[in-house]
Image: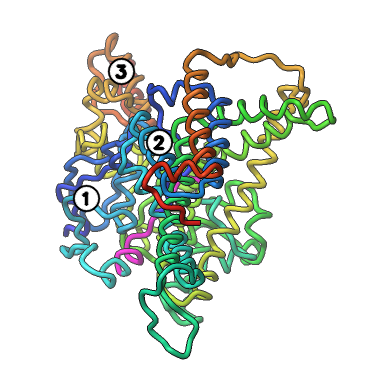
Amino acid sequence: MVILEVKNVSYGYSHGTPFEITALNNVSFSVEKGELVGIIGHTGSGKSTLIKMLNSLLKPESGQVLLHGKDINANKASIKEARSKVGLCFQYPEYQLFEETCAKDIAFGPKNMGLSTEEVKERVLKAAEFVGFSKELLNKSPFDLSGGQKRRCAIAGVMAMFPEVLVLDEPTAGLDPIGRFELLRMIENYRKDTGATVMIVSHSMDDIAKTADKILVMNKGTLAMCGSVQEVFSKADTLIEMGLSVPTATSLISRLRAEIPELSPDIFTVEAAAEELSVYFKGRTSK
Amino acid sequence: MIKDITIGQFFPGKSFIHKLDPRAKIILTFVFIVALFLCKNFFSLGLLFASALISIAVSKISFKVILKGLKMIVVLVVFTGILQIIYNDEGTLLWKPFQQFDFAVTTGGIFSAVFIIIRIVSLILFSSLLTYTTSPTMLTDAIERLLSPLKLIKVNVSSLAMMMTIALRFIPTLIEEIDIIMSAQKARGADLETGSLTQRAKALVPVFIPLIVNSFRRAYELAFAMECRCYTGDNKRTRMKEMKLGIRDYTAFLIVLLLVALVIATSFFNISSWFIFERVI
């Protein structure tokens, strides 16, 4: 079932000044319910503009964004609905915390949705559970937390609205490997638990290869590619031309393939590479 | 949106005005503004207004941008205009709507309203032309040089200039940050646009707290980075770009001097009676 559809969307900044830029040029794609979509692209390729379109923070200059088949920019009510159904979490969300305690900050979104006090409380606890926050942490000031904890608190603030589409702009930027791994697992948990669609903007091809069902590749304001992990990452040359790259495992295997042509070219994660290599070496020793 | 504010923005270019020495530009703008307040008749004011328009044309900055900048002061202009009409009772009476009140529209009132409006508009035109055509770094550099005589009375001019540079440098950063924070809070359902004044003021709390916290963080980081590079605010620094007054600047000085002479002559020595223009104030 298609949940979100972007139809021929274009957008530009600073019209009429020397700094005019076309940020998006005729972008179209659709997202299925429950999918995990990865968005990749070079800096300035229009990723951030694109995600702002998805809950009407920016309105397309031409084209439409459809949520459940309805234009989200139709009227005030539809915009409000889009804001609560499409949860947007920006880059470095920890700099947007403002309340006295984490619990209050996480409650900001659900409160704005006009829910009852009890329901807000329930949602805060549920969101805290998603990101692994203890009760003790919930009563602390967000400014006293560590960087990774702040990040999780801010993401919980968006999750607490239980959006049907959760959009995250580089959620793992600046985190250590364990923090990154944990955060991706938390996002995955949210998706499994609520059946929500998740869209992740990332510069880490490894993260995308590991988690995404579908990848959107942005290049200079246009949608350059849209397809499965295999479809996108098998076009290494095109990606490199756009200033992107393939997952580490893929580039390792492709270099090994120069020596060992029997290896499969469709390797995108470290786990798959390990599996492929062990199968190959077992086969060789048994010969 | 907040990004649409054009006052104080810099538009790079290669016109005569862009190429003027920033010190000359600051002084000339100042002289123009003083001249605007010396004006006593429509002839001299018109002269200055025309020269403002001509300078804009020479600078090749589109009138659209200029008009956008002027939009910001429409309220101020209209308000002062109305006050002038209300409080000036000179000239012939045109309209007296309420017999019991001492309010009347007179020719004098209308003349002075128009006069003040042109004066304010020209003022904004000249001062925005300065920032439109000079980069913030050039501007602070020039101010530092112009203030350098104050060193004699132990004012730390270079520190002042550094503070100004930093403040100017961070305006776009802060605007961008406000934009991001507002988007983030809007994405969480914050309503920043509707409601009563108090509601809207309250709605800004989630925007300003992170903004202030982040500004402090940035200030600490910047101070730390500057200290790491041994910055002391010492004023014995040399420049990468030396400023030099050229023939272009002297030409500009000459033109402005002529204009000011004309303004003073027509305003104070009643030479205006040679022309058909009437004395208004």
Q: Which residue is mark 1?
A: A61
Quadrant of the frame with the N terminus of chain A: bottom left
Residue B56 falls left or right of residue B127: left
Residue A184 visible in the snapshot: no
Residue A72 falls left or right of residue B72: left
Q: Residue furthest bottom?
A: B100
Say if A75 sits above or below A62 in the image: below
User: Residue B141's x, y, as percent?
Assistant: 61, 26
Local packing at callout 3 (Cα closer than 10 Å; few below 14, some 14-19, many 20+) is few
Chain on which label 1 sits: A
Label 2 residue SS: helix
Q: Which residue is mark 3?
A: A286
Q: Which residue is mark 2?
A: B51
Local packing at callout 2 (Cα closer than 10 Å; few below 14, some 14-19, many 20+) is some
**Type of the residue with mark 2:** Ser
Chain on which label 2 sits: B
Say if B239 sits above or below B165 in the image: above
What is the CA distance from the residue labelled 3 to the residue labelled 2?
92 Å
Local packing at callout 1 (Cα closer than 10 Å; few below 14, some 14-19, many 20+) is few
Which-is-in-front pick, marks 3 and 2?
Answer: 2
User: Residue A154's x, y, as percent?
Assistant: 51, 56
Which-is-in-front pick, marks 1 and 3?
Answer: 1
**Type of the residue with mark 1:** Glu
Q: Nearer the viewer, residue A219 or A238?
A: A219
Which numbered disc, 1 or 3, marks the residue that appears first in the sequence?
1
Instruction: Identify the magenta region.
Output: A81-92
Residue B235 falls left or right of residue A120: right
